[in-house]
Structure formats: structure tokens, C-alpha cells
Amino acid sequence: NAGVTQTPKFQVLKTGQSMTLQCAQDMNHNSMYWYRQDPGMGLRLIYYSASEGTTDKGEVPNGYNVSRLNKREFSLRLESAAPSQTSVYFCASSEARRGSQPQHFGDGTRLSIL
Amino acid sequence: KQEVTQIPAALSVPEGENLVLNCSFTDSAIYNLQWFRQDPGKGLTSLLLIQSSQREQTSGRLNASLDKSSGRSTLYIAASQPGDSATYLCAVESYNNNDMRFGAGTRLTVKP
């Protein structure tokens, strides 16, 4: 049972480069999320998709775009990477937002911007 | 804006001790509160979810309580083991925020 799978696990970029982080879940969940985790700050929501076909901004959306490709997949794109985007990125999914079931997380993508 | 605080940031205890981790939040209009465990280099694993209408949840040696009126939750770990060493995070989904807000976590070390 894979749960939430993120690729790649590690990535180093130069300032100004672009890349897409991939996320897929096999739990038939409706809602998916992208977070970033920085030392001492907990996790902060970048974007979420409450259901297939919808996306909305979270707390820190600037510099990012997302695509809910289908029910399983939710990608995060950095169009022009900046050193401030160096972080660990987590994808998560849940049956629904604000529900009675918890969010399930992937193992993260460790991204360094030089 | 919901603010979630966890104190202490780090805690070290000998094996076998019972311990309590604390979480406080500023806005009591919440849907739920969740406790997660994070091992180094890994993602978060959900431990317990307490809905707004509930006062506590239990799973094995773990018990989480919720007091909305005071904006507090505690995670009680009984008979701690070295395998419990990890970072524990609490998170709150609120009526007045689009997102789930996380505390910065408590890093727990259980010494053999």
C-alpha cells in the first residue's frame, strides 16, 4: 500500500531554474495539499485542492503554481526558483477537508536552491 | 489568524516515564485538532484526530485531550520507550482559516 508518493526525493537547482514536484496518492482521496517545512516554523500550506478540478491558495502561495491533473495526482511547479524556496516540500491527501479523517503525508522532497 | 504553539521545543526523558506534550491555539472556532509524529527525514504520521465535539481520543499508550474553551490540547504518552523518540506536531483546522495550522513541534528523546 503506497499511500502518498512524491518524486523526486532530493533536488538541487540554480536560481531562476524551473521544476515540477510530483505527487500521487492511491487512497481515492478527494483532497490534496502541498506544504513546505522550514526549520523552527512548522509546516505551512502552499496550495490545496479540495476536489478534482479545483485548486486554492494556502498561506504561502507566492512563487508557486499547482495542477490537479486527476483525482490521484497533484503537482507543484516552481517557475523561477529563488533561494528563499529552499525547503522540504510535503504532499498530503485526505478524504475531505475539515473532516473526521486525518491527512496522509508523503516522505517529502528536499529542495535546495543555489 | 490561528496561531499554534508547542512548548517545550525539546524534551528528554528516561525510558518508562509518563509524559505530556502541550499544544495551545488562539482561535477556539475549530473543526478538529490532530497530533502527528515525524521521524527524521520522513513525512508526518497521524497519531490522533480529535473532532471539535470530542474531548479526547485514545490509541494504545497515547491519549490526546482537547479543551476548546482554553485553547489547549495535551498528548499523554504512557510508559515511554526509545522508539517513541521523534518530533510530535499538533495541527488545527479552523473555521476562520483555509488551511490547517501547525505548531513547530516538540522534539522528544527517550533515553534507554
Image (cartoon, rainbow, N blue to C red):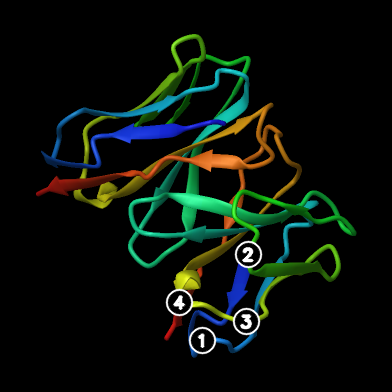
Q: Which residue is mark 3?
A: A80
User: Which x, y percent locates residue B74?
Assistant: 37, 24
At mark 4, the secondary structure is helix
Is residue A107 visible in this depiction of the protein? no
Query: Given the image, on which type of amino acid does mark 1 rest?
Result: Thr
Residue A4's disc number: 2
Most foreground residue, B77 or A81: A81
Q: Residue at x 75, y 46 (%)?
A: A95
Q: Return the residue nearer the eye: B67 or B14.
A: B67
The amino acid on which the numbered mark 2 sits, given as a three-letter code, is Val
Which residue carries the number 4 mark? A83
Say which chain tag 2 marks: A
Q: Which mark is residue A15?
A: 1
Specify whether B23 is left or right of A98.
left
Residue B37 spot, x, y in % from top left = 40, 48
Taking the image as drawn, is residue B53 in sight? yes
